Structures are given as C-alpha cells and as structure tokens.
Image (spheres, grey):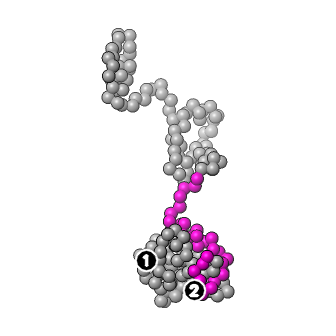
Amino acid sequence: MGKHSLTKDHSRRNAVVVAAVGVGAVVALPATAQAATVQVPGTDFSAEVPDELIAAAGDYTGVDVNAVAGDVASQANLPAAPSSVGQQIADKALSKQGAPYVWGATGPDAFDCSGLTSWAYSQLGKSIPRTSDAQAYSGTPVSLDALQPGDIVSYYAGASHVGIYIGDHKIVHALNEGEPVQINDLDYMPINNAVRF
C-alpha cells in the first residue's frame, strides 16, 4: 500500500474518504448522483437509472417507471420469464386442441384422455402411468383449491377420465369419440380427485 499524507489544506471529508477506501468501504459522497432502481417486470433484470437521465428526458411525474422498463424490454426482444414445469405441461396439452379422440391413442396426432396427459408430461421428460385410474392414484393428492397448471384432475368414481388443469378453473382434455381435444370448465363433469406429479 502506498504512503498517504494529508496536508492542512485537505478537508476533513477527504480524510474520511481516504480512511474508508483504505478499509475497502464504498463511499457515496453527498455530491454523488442519485439513481432509481428499475425492475423489468417478469424478469430478474434490474438496472440503476441515474436521476440525471430521468430529468433529461423531461418531467414524467406520475409515470410508472417499471411499466416503461417493461415496454423497453419487450421492444428489445428480451426473453420472457421462464414458466413453471406445470405450465409447460399445460401448454403442451393445449397445443393439441382440435386433435381427434381415438381410444388407446397416445399422440402425437390423436389421443384418448390419459394418452393426452401422459403425452404432455413426456414432452418435458416426465414419465407418468398410462391409464386414467393409475394416474389418479399415483401422484400426490392436491385439493381443488390448491390446483396449479399441469395438475391432473380425474373424473367419475374410479377415475375413468382425466384432464390437465390449465388455470382459471379450466381443464384441457380428450373427452370421447367424436369430440376433439378441448377446453372445458373444471367442474364440467363430477370430479373424483386431483394429483400432482
């Protein structure tokens, strides 16, 4: 470490700064510019925006800085925040809306109810039982008020039908012969149980 000397004409503030720097502290002097932290919605990205830049841009009193940052992020084509595995499973099943129901079919172009659920899970490398009753009784039970996208909901006594919860009180499922893969309300049929894998 180099030798430091203070002369009489240095201010007391300079002495404090030198001492603080000597012990590795970060010092913000009163004259240092202030900055606002801006969080880009839906991401882990944030940045410090100096007040001078905000002032130079004009008077934006009342402007939601985070909303503006979100607009900038979308215009910059930043990647979207990753979705949960459950949401990705629901999205895979949703991508098959309109596919025909065929008993025993497991995709990728036709499905029965448990064929759709097992296919959607397999697209994310998850292996679940093939039949509706095995799916209904193999996962971890979930109460209906705690459902998350990707959970499997079974219907009728004996779990003779299953669908994938997609959120907003809806499921996607392969209903039966003559009906394509579709979205219906969660309670479209009598619910047996719900599970999460």
Q: In this view, does 1 lie above or below 144?
A: above
Look at 33% across and 17% down and name the residue there: 4
* Labels 2 and 1: the sequence-earlier one: 2
* Residue found at the very far bottom of the displayed protein: 157
Look at 63% across and 83% down and name the residue there: 101
* Disc on res. 104: 2
Under mark 2, the amino acid is Gly
Q: Is residue 152 visible?
A: yes
| Quadrant of the snapshot with the N terminus | top left
Label 1, residues with CA under 10 Å away: few <14, some 14-19, many ≥20: some
Q: What whole-number distance in Å separates the C-alpha atoms at marks 2 and 1?
A: 21 Å
The answer to whether residue 112 is left or right of residue 158 is right
Q: Name the residue under label 1.
A: 139
Which mark is in front, 2 or 1? 2
Q: Where is residue 194 in the image (x, y as percent from the top left)?
A: 47, 78
Under mark 1, the amino acid is Gly
Label 2, residues with CA under 10 Å away: few <14, some 14-19, many ≥20: some
Main SS category, magenta section:
loop
Q: Do the residues labelled 2 and 1 touch (CB within 8 Å)?
A: no
Q: Where is residue 54 in the image (x, y as percent from the top left)?
A: 59, 35
Q: In this view, does 177 lie above or below 197?
A: below
The secondary structure type at the circle numbered 2 is loop
Q: In this view, does 103 lie above or below 126?
A: below
Look at 62% across and 39% down and name the residue there: 60
Please say whether residue 91 is one of the residues in the magenta stretch: yes
The secondary structure type at the circle numbered 1 is loop
* Residue found at the very far top of the displayed protein: 8
Q: Is residue 64 visible?
A: no
Magenta region: which residues?
A: 79-108
Please say whether residue 113 is one of the residues in the magenta stretch: no
Q: Position of residue 188 (x, y in %)?
A: 58, 82
